[in-house]
Image (spheres, grey):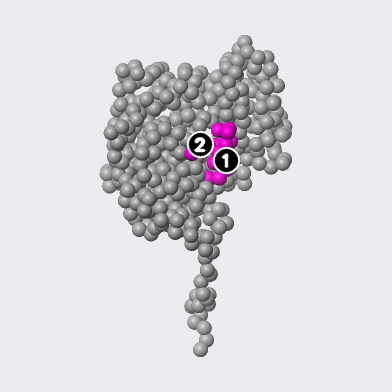
């Protein structure tokens, strides 16, 4: 008899044996269930001796620029979700009181839904990935999953979603994580490492969901708008908004208190008299942290710099915009040097292996991201006050964009949640033992149910902490400046 033309001749071949060490890695994940049962991952129950959240914020403010701390608090006070974004330290403190799996991966440390987005790769493609690694550190994989899941619970409530719709978003995030980790554990080594979510893949996903009537036309339009906006947010657009020519010299435009030029901060100091020389030395040292023997940074020269207020949780840390030019004044490059302090996770986990906190951020980012900015590096700089501080450095706004959570529909939010969960899983697969994680999670939905319960109960905790935070502002315990509340 001849072969069945519809059959796969390979189906009769014996399966390829999996290397024993791979089998052992998965079994270690299953064994971790005894130490931390999946059902014990939630809900959150506040311990009687829980640290006062306001005290933690006060402690965190001690290392920040005092004049900017009120701005940070005003931004956090706008909503429960804004507060959650700025409260990574509070959540780390709470997670540290719960049993954990002991399965260690490179954590983002602040994996909430607004820390995902689209940006340009060095190959000039748009991909969806994580984009904030200030708190990155090795730690239990579920800490990132819980931070992400709870962010959708908080945001869903704020958007007025029904409890079932909010839970659907949370479940989508955790399910996306579990399924993607399972795929990574079954994939070849390089397929697991190379996997990423580019713009075309995103479009195919939404079209597929649309055919299943799980995503509406609005979700498609929002994705296209986000991708289009990201492409427009390139270095030239940033240059046109931030830079002007004064007496024939390129200068960053002042916008107090958000952007303060170096000459206004350094008046009367040695830095004012030798700004160019100091920055030349800094850039030479920074260059040595970049990847590659030959790098385009060597063709740029320093022109100007200014202090810039960034983000929400990072407000008060020191950040600089550095203006460089290449062939001529129409060939600009804007770098952002952002102060890197010890991760909020370090007091609860092992300290960083890197002496320079900027190096900690960059090493973690390079490991977790599918493709990182070629200008990503670090440097230790002596500030205007004579103190030494660590910084991570990257290009400012290179095809960067995201989805506005304040405009999400329940269906669109559920789709976004799943993509975020998948993206986090890919990052953990590169930065940890994907087989151990997959072995712990298993094929059932016990972990999902537990994390959904955690997210719902932690959203309650976040609302209570937000109320305490607003009361501390109203009473004067925390500094407030209403004049900065509208700054963006």
Which mark, residue 351?
2
Rendered-image quadrant of the C terminus:
top left
Give me the residue at 43% from left, 57% from top.
439
Q: Residues within 10 Å of mark 2 (few under 14, many from 20)?
A: some
> Percent position (x, y) of residue 162?
27, 43
How would you classify the magenta stretch by its main secondary structure? helix
Which residues lie in the magenta part? 350-368
> At x 50% / y 36%, what residue is drawn?
351
Question: Would residue 40 appear left or right of 253 to someone viewing this image?
Answer: left
Q: Could you tell me which residue is drawn at 62 percent across and 31 percent down?
A: 379
**Marked residue nearer the N-terminal end (2 or 1):** 2
- Residue occupied by mark 1: 363
Residue 394 x, y percent position in the rendering: 59, 35
Q: Is residue 231 above or below residue 203?
A: above
Foreground residue, 153 or 127? 153
Q: Is-magenta flag for residue 31? A: no
Locate residue 154: give its quadrant: top left
Report the Cα–Cα distance between label 2 and label 1. Answer: 15 Å
């Amino acid at each position: 008899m001849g072969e069945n033309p519809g059959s796969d001749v390979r189906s009769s071949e014996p399966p390829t044996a999996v290397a024993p060490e791979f089998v052992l890695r998965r079994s270690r994940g299953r064994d971790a269930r005894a130490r931390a049962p999946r059902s014990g991952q939630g809900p959150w129950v506040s311990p009687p001796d829980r640290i006062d959240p306001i005290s933690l914020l006060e402690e965190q403010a001690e290392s920040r620029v005092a004049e900017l701390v009120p701005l940070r608090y005003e931004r956090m006070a706008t909503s429960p979700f804004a507060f959650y974004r700025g409260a990574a330290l509070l959540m780390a403190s709470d997670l540290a009181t719960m049993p954990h799996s002991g399965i260690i991966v490179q954590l983002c440390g602040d994996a909430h839904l607004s820390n995902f987005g689209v940006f340009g790769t060095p190959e000039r493609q748009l991909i969806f990935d994580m984009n904030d690694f200030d708190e990155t550190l090795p730690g239990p994989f579920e800490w990132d999953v819980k931070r992400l899941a709870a962010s959708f619970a908080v945001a869903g409530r704020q958007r007025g979603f029904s409890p079932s719709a909010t839970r659907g978003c949370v479940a989508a995030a955790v399910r996306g994580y579990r399924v993607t980790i399972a795929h990574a554990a079954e994939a070849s080594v390089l397929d697991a490492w190379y996997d990423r979510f580019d713009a075309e893949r995103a479009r195919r996903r939404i079209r597929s969901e649309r055919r299943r009537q799980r995503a509406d036309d609005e979700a498609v339009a929002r994705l296209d708008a986000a991708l289009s906006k990201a492409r427009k947010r390139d270095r030239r657009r940033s240059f046109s908004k931030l830079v002007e020519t004064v007496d024939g010299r390129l200068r960053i435009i002042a916008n107090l208190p958000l952007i303060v030029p170096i000459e206004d901060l350094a008046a009367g100091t040695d830095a004012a008299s030798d700004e160019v020389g100091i920055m030349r030395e800094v850039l030479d040292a920074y260059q040595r942290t970049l990847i590659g023997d030959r790098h385009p940074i060597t063709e740029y020269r320093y022109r100007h710099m200014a202090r810039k207020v960034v983000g929400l949780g990072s407000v008060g840390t020191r950040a600089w915009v550095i203006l460089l030019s290449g062939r001529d004044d129409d060939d600009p490059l804007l770098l952002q040097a952002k102060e890197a302090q010890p991760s909020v996770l370090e007091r609860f986990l092992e300290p960083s292996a890197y002496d320079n906190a900027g190096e900690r951020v960059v090493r973690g980012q390079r490991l977790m991201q599918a493709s990182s900015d070629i200008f990503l590096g670090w440097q230790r700089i002596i500030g205007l006050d004579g103190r030494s501080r660590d910084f991570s450095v990257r290009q400012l706004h290179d095809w960067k964009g995201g989805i506005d959570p304040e405009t999400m529909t329940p269906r669109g939010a559920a789709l976004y949640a799943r993509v975020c969960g998948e993206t986090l899983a890919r990052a953990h697969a590169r930065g940890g033992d994907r087989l151990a994680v997959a072995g712990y999670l298993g094929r059932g939905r016990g972990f999902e149910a537990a994390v959904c319960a955690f997210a719902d109960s932690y959203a309650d905790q976040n609302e209570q902490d937000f109320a305490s935070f607003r009361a501390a502002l109203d009473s004067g315990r925390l500094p407030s400046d209403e004049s900065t509340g509208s700054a963006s």
